Image (cartoon, grey):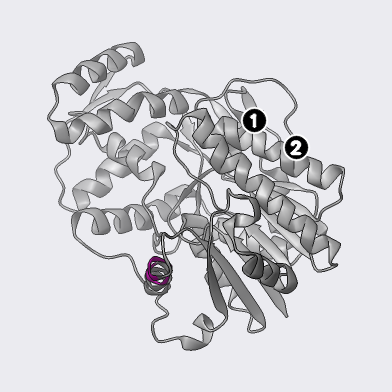
Amino acid sequence: MNTYFLTGATGAVGSAVVPLLLTEPDTQVRLLLRAESDAALAERVSDLTHFWGWSDSPERMSRIKAYRGDAALPDFGLSDVHHAELVHECTHIIHCAGTVRMNLSIEDARRSAVGSAEATVGFARKLAAGGRLHKFEYVSTVGVAGKRPGALPEIWMDEPREFHNTYEQAKAEAEEIVRRAIVTEGLPITVHRPSMVIGDSRDGHIIHFQIFYFICEFLSGRKTFGLFPDFSEARLDVIPVDWVAEAIVASSQDQGTTGRIFHLCSGPEGAIQLEELKAIVRSAFKAHGLDVPHGIRLPRAGFAILTRLAGRLAPLSRRKALATLPIYLDYLADRQGFDNSAYTAWLAVRNKSLPRAQAYLPYVLGRYIAGKYHGLRDSR
């Protein structure tokens, strides 16, 4: 029997991983969830049960046990009894937890990324010492490339570089902890670097609407009075959450992926041009009955000045969105790419190939618009 310890089950990736794990009838899952009390923990588990559509599936829920703790704390902030339980039971680790916010202080970003890397690697050492650790899947981000130009290869990063934000910087520092655990200690770890994770490629299903959806609001023109910068040839690399989850689960069952780095992303050729994405977004919003302002394209410098002014003069309901735009514009301005040849070759061995963004974006955007504007609660 395999028993998985998983962090980040309430996040986009973790919430998609759990159902895949439990398709195997002899698999057990142990979840680490942040909660202020046992009652709050039960409520979080109930929310997950609803999201998964498992209210009438006691068999699957019987194979899940949730622990109240914090992935960024030593021993996850668990009691000695609970921590010992997990060390005795678990055979696999999947670390998905992380605060995906780009405007945290570097101290807070490190507390989340570096702290959780140290805690999960420490836990892995204990499992390995007891001869129980089969595999450890560590979820990083392609953002560890920072502002490095060109296509980032699926290798460790040694070169000095600048970062767009504290999230990228902290994740890069956390990767170094994982790297040492692989290279110097021989722990069986695979590093997964997803790009921007979006809804399920089949129906748009996702537990939270995160960064991509803010960008889509921006591309619709509804938050910027129809003003857009000139995106030129810039592209955005996105990956559906079901493909990320599939890779993580499959890797956890494949010892041949130990020590490898996979870029779970669309790749330089598959990443969609922002101008094309803008057209798809605006078309989807219109098709779902939403007003979309006439678009006006401006040079980047002029757009930045106007949005700063608009941020001061706009209604309060729009100021927050406009204030965060510079963070995303800096990210979108770079002509970056992420090489995914190792990932796609591994997919090919398993007779799989990535779908094109144009094929799944209508489902992703449709689910978002239905949830945000038409009140559809996102559950199976």
Q: Tag 1: Cα neighbours inside 10 Å, few (<14), some, or many (≥20)?
A: some
List the residue tagged with mark 2. 155
State the extent of the magenta-drawn residues as a range.
Answer: 39-43
Whether residue 112 sits left or right of residue 123 in the image: it is left
In the picture, residue 96 is in which quadrant?
bottom right
The answer to whether one can see residue 140 in this image is no
* Above or below, 314 relative to 44: above
Residue 177: numbered disc:
none
Query: Badge 2, how many Cα within 10 Å: few under 14, some, many 20+?
Result: few
Counting from the top left corner in percent of width and height, residue 135 is at: 76, 62
Residue occupied by mark 1: 151
* Nearer to the camera, 335 or 65: 65
Q: Nearer the viewer, residue 375 or 240?
A: 375
Residue drawn at the location 35% of the way across and 16% of the way down: 300
Q: Which picture quadrant has residue 38? A: bottom left
Q: Which residue is situated farthest in the front direction here?
A: 80
> Looking at the image, is mark 1 or mark 2 nearer the viewer?
2
